[in-house]
Amino acid sequence: MKATVLKNCRLIREVSGNVPFTFADVAFTGGKITVIEPAGKYLPAPGDQTVDCTGKTLLPGLYDIHQHSDAISVNFLDNRKILDPYDFLNQVCLWSMRMLRMGYTSLRCMGAQNLAGIRLRKMVDAGVFNGPRVFACGNTIAGTTKQVIGENPGCDGPAEWMKAARTAIANDADFIKIYASGSVMANFGEPGQMVVTPEEIAAAVQAASARGVYAAAHAHSTESIQACLDAGVRTIEHATWLTRDQCHAIKDAGDRHFIVPTLSVMQWCASIAETDNPELYYLADRAAKVMDSAKESIARAYDEGLLLGWGTDLDVESLEKEPGQEFRLRREWCGMSGTDMIRQATMNSAYIVGLGDVSGQIKPGYEADLLLYDGNPDEDISLFNTRPIVYKRGRLVDETFPVKK
Ligand SMILES: [Zn+2]
């Protein structure tokens, strides 16, 4: 089979199997990486396609493991106005391609209207188009409350939480998503308030784990994070009031729990009053309540050496304005290094979603989800605001893909 050979590309060793050289020829075929050799060593076979990558850095495709497939507009209320299901699905497919063009070859949908994430995943898996890999939760699970914006009617009591978890799995969810605390987005109560009982969380997690499915939880407060850790929730999203003791407990538990920070959406909420969406201006006050704690908690988790995932929780329009903003914010607010952030956005997130041995690194046998950036993005993270060349499973993603103006 003919291979594509990327000649003389620069590697970041930490996400390239710690290869003992920096400049390499990387070949892939059949959607998988086949050969990595020091630059100049690889002899292409007749018919191979070679690409001169001098001056470019090769990265594994990025993961955004806190996204929403219906986050198509800067005003999340807009997408609720799309009534025609086909118009809606078109927008969801375009959303995924716009994310892919920014280098996000894998996305985890944390809840969207009409099971949009699951429907999108099925289309990509069926080969309808060469979109990003999608993981989806289907219906989110929350109690009866005005404090979260979920897609599910309220579930009350352990039996209803168990039923909702089983319903999500019956809808072909990859994982379940629960709301343990109030949210910033809903204009009621405090984001940190517990909106569920530990027994309800435990019932949903048990029902899921019995089917081999893990749980992800929206959790801001210390109390809600603790209830999730106690119940065996795998990914804690946002984690605004994560304590040092909880960091230690997560480390001691080994591979059981992971934190997925979402700094971009915090910044978005804080700056919403600068936009022309007055119906969302309340978010600035809501964000002010969580902002300082979020910065401290995530800096603490980084300082403690926890394995962090990569989430933005941001709509695609806002992300297109500054694709590298999660990198900028983790640097400015939490002092993270470029290489560490690249690990978070690639191999760490692949590991968290269970694909660490096939995706998220540049290694022979790994999937050829690859990005080429001009320059050295590990040293200059502003390069994440430029558009990379994107290969998804070894296929070049159309660079001229129309991005909404
Ligand atoms: Zn979210």
Image (cartoon, helix red, strand yellow):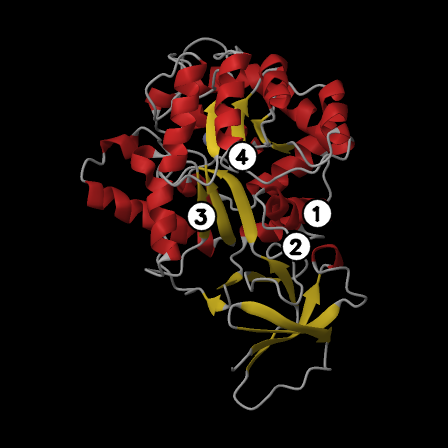
Please name the residue shown 69% across and 53% down the image. Answer: 378
Q: Earlier in the sequence, mark 1 or mark 4?
A: 4
Q: Please provide percent x and percent y for residue 285.
A: 48, 15
Secondary structure under the numbered disc 4 in the rendered image: loop
Q: Which residue is mark 3?
A: 134
Amino acid type assigned to the residue bearing label 1 in the image: Gly
Amino acid type assigned to the residue bearing label 4 in the image: Tyr
Task: Residue lying at the far front in this picture: please name it.
Answer: 210
Decide if residue 59 is on the left or right side of residue 64.
Answer: right
Distance (Cα) linking label 3 and label 1? 25 Å
Q: Please provide percent x and percent y for residue 340.
A: 72, 45
Q: Earlier in the sequence, mark 2 or mark 4?
A: 4
Residue 139 visible in this rendered orientation of the protein: no
Q: Which residue is mark 2?
A: 377
Q: Which residue is mark 1?
A: 338
Distance (Cα) linking label 3 and label 4? 16 Å
Q: Earlier in the sequence, mark 2 or mark 3?
A: 3
Please tell me whether residue 148 is drawn above or below residue 334 in the rendered image. Answer: above
Distance (Cα) linking label 1 and label 4? 30 Å
Distance (Cα) linking label 2 and label 4? 33 Å
